Image (cartoon, grey):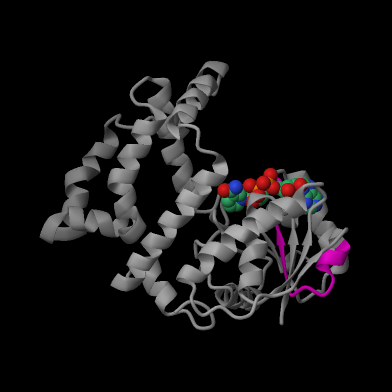
């Protein structure tokens, strides 16, 4: 069975470990935090509960080894997934240590939300084996992963990375160019920035903004994305009509665009207060369970309709239906 090394086991690293294990890979796991094993076990329990509901042809679970050092974790691994805090100097130092122990043909992937692979490769002994594999939370359930190589990464390595990610039930999307924050986080940041303005300007609360998403366009996005949604919004005339009708709006000041709201104490307090009220006493773990149950129900529905992520899961080879 192949082996993956997980370096950094917080929210994302633990979920990567769970995905690899549940898809039959052995996992060598390293995180220096004293509570890292407990964090991993909590995430792994959630993954064991939910993943088999939508990925229904899973192999026997791989073996987990907890490692005291990066060197121990990286030695012998085919895939190394770095998920340390989003600080370039930490990631670069970790990657140097990883490369001192891993095989030259191993793939060294980073979960970074914002850094470009060429930034991660600076100072590295073998830049050609480092790329970005950016997942979405919860990594054990959501199939998408953005693969971002730099010019230093050969095509053969990219293809091998895509094949390995498919092996653990993921849908890799390889970007055509490296940019800060890749694609998904670019889109999300634009929405996030607007939402912060709407709260700062007193237009809506966190709960109202979430309701507008969850009862409306969030449902559309989950199965039709942005462009197919707008194609249908244009009626029979489709995308051309939609662009003609709504294109001019882009010139009006509907959005604050790239202006960044000042995240001062007052705004932070307001968001935290509204978010606490919205949670109504539910813990983060309870919110995660609600999220996972909903995702599973939605993925099942999409599988039944054989559309979007459901169509992808229906056609998975080793795992999935
Ligand atoms: N949270 C998300 O939704 C999300 C989504 C996609 C990608 N990411 C990216 O994943 C990465 C990790 O994010 P996270 O949310 O899991 O953060 P996190 O703070 O939950 O976890 C980071 C972990 O790294 C460990 N760590 C710190 N120094 C280390 C070292 N030298 N060696 C090994 N482990 C070390 C910490 O103990 C911690 O457990 C970041 O690059 C982030 O941008 C996050």
Q: Which residue is drawn at 54% across and 60% down?
A: 177
130 to the left or right of 225: right
Residue 139 horizontal/vertical position (percent) = 56, 59
184 sits to left or right of 34: left
Above or below residue 202? Residue 180 is below
Which sits in the foreground, 231 or 70? 70
- In the image, residue 218 lies at what x, y percent? 34, 49
**Magenta stretch encompasses residue 148:** no
Evaluate whether residue 139 shows in this view. yes
**Is the residue 253 above or below the residue 77 in the image?**
above
Per the rendered image, the range of residues in magenta is 71-86
Name the image quarter holding residue 47. bottom right
Q: Which residue of the protein is positioned furthest toward the top in this rendering?
A: 266
Position above or below: 153 against 185: below
Which image quarter is the C terminus in?
Answer: bottom left
Regarding residue 180, the answer to whether it shows in the image is no
């Amino acid at each position: 069975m192949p082996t993956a090394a997980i370096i950094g086991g917080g929210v994302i690293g633990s979920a990567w470990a769970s995905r690899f294990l549940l898809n039959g890979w052995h996992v060598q796991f390293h995180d220096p935090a004293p509570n890292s094993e407990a964090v991993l076990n909590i995430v792994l329990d959630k993954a064991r509960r939910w993943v088999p509901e939508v990925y229904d042809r899973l192999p026997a679970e791989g073996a987990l080894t907890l490692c005291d050092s990066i060197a121990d974790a990286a030695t012998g691994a085919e895939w190394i997934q770095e998920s340390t805090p989003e600080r370039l100097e930490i990631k670069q130092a970790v990657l140097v240590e990883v490369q001192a122990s891993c095989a030259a043909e191993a793939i060294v992937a980073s979960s970074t939300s914002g850094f470009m692979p060429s930034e991660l490769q600076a100072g590295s002994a073998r830049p050609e084996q480092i790329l970005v594999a950016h997942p979405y939370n919860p990594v054990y359930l959501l199939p998408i992963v953005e693969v971002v190589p730099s010019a230093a990464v050969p095509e053969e390595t990219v293809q091998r990375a895509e094949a390995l990610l498919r092996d653990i039930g993921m849908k890799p999307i390889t970007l055509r160019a490296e940019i800060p924050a890749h694609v998904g986080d670019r889109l999300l940041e634009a929405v996030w920035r607007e939402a912060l303005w709407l709260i700062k300007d007193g237009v809506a609360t966190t709960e109202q903004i979430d309701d507008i998403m969850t009862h409306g366009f969030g449902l559309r996005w989950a199965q039709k994305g942005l462009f197919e949604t707008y194609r249908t919004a244009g009626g029979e005339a489709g995308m051309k009509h939609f662009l003609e009708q709504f294109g001019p709006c882009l010139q009006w000041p509907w959005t604050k665009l790239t202006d960044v709201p000042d995240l001062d104490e007052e705004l932070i307090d307001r968001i935290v207060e509204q978010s606490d009220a919205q949670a109504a006493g539910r813990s983060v773990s309870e919110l995660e369970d609600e999220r996972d149950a909903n995702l599973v129900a939605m993925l099942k529905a999409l599988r039944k309709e054989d559309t979007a992520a459901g169509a992808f899961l229906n056609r998975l080879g080793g795992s999935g239906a």
